[in-house]
Amino acid sequence: SKEASLLVSAESSSSSSSSTPTDCDCDSDSSFFVYPSYYGGNPSSIPPLRSSSSSSRRRMPSSLNYFRTLQDAADAIAASSSSFNNPTRRCRRRRRRTVYLLPGVHVLDRPLVLDERHDNTAWKKAKRTGGGGGEGEGGGKAVRVRGGYRIHPSLFRPWSEDGKILVAPIDKAVGDLGKIRSGGLNDCANSKAEVFFDGQPLILARYPNVDPRTGRWRWDAIKNVTSENTFTFSGDRPLARNYSEALPDLWLHGYWQYDWADNYVRVESIDESSRSYAIDTNATPLLHNLTIDARYYAVNVLGELDAPGEYYIDARRRLLYLYPPSRGGKHKMTDDTEVILSTVENLVVGHNVSNVTFSGVHFSVSRGTALHFADASGVRILGGSVANSGGGNDSAAAVVLIDARDCDIAGVTIERCSCGGIDVRGGDRTSLMPSGITVRGNKIRDYARWKRTYMFGVRFDGCGHVVSGNAVSDAPHSGVSGRGNDCIIDSNAFSDLCYEGVDAGAFYAGRSYAERGNVVSNNVFRRIRMTENATLGYPHVQALYLDDQMSGYSLINNTIFDSDTGILMGGGRDNRVVGNRFVRTALPLMLDDRGLSWMKGSCRPGGKFEEELKGYHYDRPPWSIRYPALNRTFDDRPCYPTRNVVEDFAFCGVEEGKSWIRTPGTKMEELVLWDNSFEGIVQDDSMCRNASSSSSASPKLTLLRRRRYGGGGGGGGNHGNRKRAYYELEGRSVNGTTAYGRRGR
């Protein structure tokens, strides 16, 4: 693209290095200014700059450092740090640096790389005086950092007979165009270049097409499985559209055996006589076995470039084919149209950095993780946005903090990501040292564009994370998930999740006796339900999912609207479910005993769960003090769902004729016998009359009176030869189901 670069050089970087710093220099702050790659307006007419500080008394530095690119500024900071860190210097404190980014688009041709030399640096928007303050000039225009190459609209020519499909050459300067990768269960690494049209991601040519009305995906289905790597398809579309010409670049993306696991596979050959595909399982192994009726679609086929918003890249001929999105029924581009091809793997990469802040910066377009920090402390990403990112080898998210301490991601809008949103890892689980990481007030939406399952809006791993006040929405699978101890998931809003994959949860955690002390509280869940037809498995999804004997969680004061299942506890123990409300939720609670059947190998003495606990020395401080219930885990009915507490539980709108609880594999009487407690179970139909799905307001719960019944003879009190006492809830009917509570000892 022929974008005008500002002809401003880093003249001050050489002049500043010519003088010998003094002790006073050590104690002063430094400012750097970076001009955008391009923006609307004449470079010579740029108004004077002012500090972005809210204080009008803040003194501007006497000398300014101007740079063309972010990396030039980073290199200058690194060079000054080398001089600054001379051991003979007598500096009283660490120097603070501020990099002011002028409004406009800052195009990266390589990642911005930061290390310990860039400590104590803030990157933020520079404000201007004068100009009208509008989007085109003055202080109103945003700072955008982009890792993509613009293909100018003048380069496109009509390709199809009707002129709707266009073609343009891809400059060799772009380099490698990448490849589609298969991906495992949690793997979203994909190096293939993507195309964005005025900030919106386009769809790689496919069949069936995405539903233009709803934006939801459509699927084909396996007709018959003929071998471990071949299956037949219905109809003759692959023949009519010449799929054979797309080989070896034809791929299939599908849920091959379970509707909770998807991946991509490359087609090795097509047998036209039998109407069958052969999968190259050596290069692209199937995630699971092929299954009749499994859903899939064909992708990366030039012959399927037939809908607005689709594209195809011919990597060998370096051509981009494009069917522009419709604008008022027309498919035309103007000189202002931005067609962007992703080129850079990461936008910012930081290792061993401390006290680095990005404030109000809008990041977009990367093939991999946009912002990636490892072994970092004091990293703060405040405001701004991250959009149109890809995935990474070690993490499938747009923003990643690994081995991090005291970091903050706040007020950021993260959207249109190929994989997940935020991934944070830190703290020490053995010593229970918290990470100090907070993820707060972010909007995370429309993610998992490429890999559909196990891509999370927020993923956490470690100890002591806080995920609070975020809005997570519009994704085919889960919202927040993680592993760890003493993490807080509080006051978040979850909506329109889990609509495509089954056996999922808007909040999901699973398979551990060791992940104790976690609290999920004061969250609101809306429309957590499967809306697509599931062909492989029961189409249930949950707002809160404690899977496969997950234990030691506290689920407190959450509200669930218009969802399939409210809470599923899959055989766990020592969980507290208190003060939750369920409005128009088909099944408020499900609790099973899978540890006594197909999962008993993990929870029995000597199994996987005990080995994990031994790794944390759970029988010694600090674990034995922080989690005393663990000390008797393998002496007190291991594998049993025991010591769970369900209290102050209000619901309305349960499916007619159904109970507020399902206990597959067991009975309520047995659960009570195993020291599980169910108290304050209330059907309150006024919640459905008064509360809307757009409001988190819920009526106050009322504890009902209890009375003792049962005994040695008959009724529910006789289990074997032991006498038990139970409590029956009085008052309103609990949907035809008797609610029990174990009497405390």
Image (tube, rainbow, N blue to C red):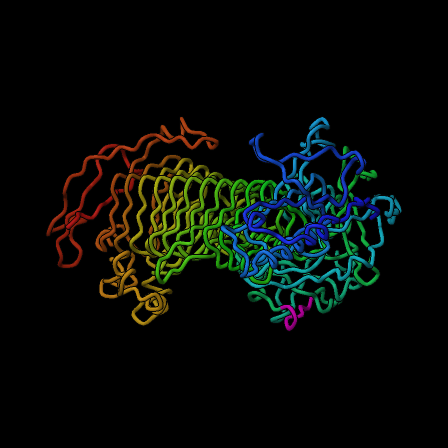
Q: How many marks?
A: 0
Q: Pinpoint residue 695: horizontal percent, then vertical percent.
A: 45, 30
Task: Tell me what residue is drawn at x 52 percent, y 53 percent.
Answer: 91
In this view, the residue in front, 257 or 276, is 257
Residue at the far left in the pictured view: 712
Residue 454 seen from this side: no
**683 magenta-colored:** no
Q: Pinpoint residue 288: horizontal percent, then vertical percent.
A: 55, 65
Task: Tell me what residue is drawn at x 81 percent, y 51 percent.
Answer: 321
**282 magenta-colored:** yes
| Up-down relation of residue 81 to residue 740 (above or below) | below
In this view, the residue in front, 597 or 39, is 39
Residue 691 seen from this side: yes
Q: Pinpoint residue 177: horizontal percent, then vertical percent.
A: 75, 60
In this view, the residue in front, 442 or 407, is 407
Q: Is residue 459 left or right of residue 44?
A: left
Q: Is residue 721 left or right of residue 552?
A: left
Magenta residues (range)? 277-284
Image quadrant where residue 40 sits? top right
Task: Tell me what residue is drawn at x 20 percent, y 41 percent.
Answer: 728
Image quadrant where residue 524 sits? top left
Image quadrant where residue 215 sits? top right
In this view, the residue in front, 259 or 613, is 613
State whether the magenta stretch is mostly helix, strand or loop: loop
Q: Pinpoint residue 539: horizontal percent, then vertical percent.
A: 49, 50
